[in-house]
Image: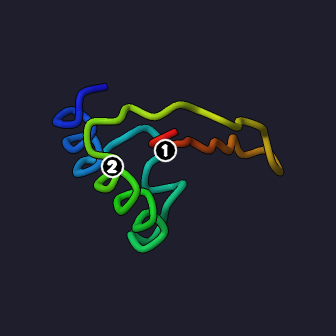
Amino acid sequence: MPADIREQRLIEWAEAPGGRASHPREEHLLPLHVVAGAAGDDIGHQVFQDRVIGSMQSAFMFGG
């Protein structure tokens, strides 16, 4: 995904399906915003996905 689209999606995170329910407070997403900024144009890739206590969890890696 191009960096400009990723940036817009991060700005509009609360409007994403389940966005506010998954992240009731903004500081829960600060690490994601920092990583996305540091990643620059690197699209990254998913390194983990699993259901934990009924909630889908994912992890992504950038720069490697």
Residue 35 or 20: which is nearer the viewer?
35
Q: Where is residue 34 in the image (x, y as percent from the top left)?
A: 36, 62
Instruction: State the residue lying farthest toward the right.
Output: 53
Q: Is residue 50 left or right of residue 2?
A: right
Check disc 2 and give the amino acid type: Trp
- Residue pictured at 44% horizontal, 71% vertical: 25
Determine which residue is flagged by label 2.
13
Q: Where is residue 6 in the image (x, y as percent from the top left)?
A: 27, 38
State how the image is colored: rainbow
Q: Where is residue 15 in the image (x, y as percent from the top left)?
A: 31, 45
Q: Is residue 15 left or right of residue 5?
A: right
- Residue pictured at 44% horizontal, 49% vertical: 19
- Residue pictured at 40% horizontal, 68% vertical: 30
- Residue pictured at 22% horizontal, 36% vertical: 3
Quadrant that contains the N terminus? top left
Residue 21 or 8: which is nearer the viewer?
8
Residue 57 or 24: which is nearer the viewer?
57
Q: Nearer the viewer, mark 1 or mark 2?
A: 2
Determine which residue is flagged by label 1.
18
Number of numbered callouts drawn: 2
Q: Where is residue 47 in the image (x, y as percent from the top left)?
A: 66, 35
Q: Is residue 32 above or below residue 49?
A: below
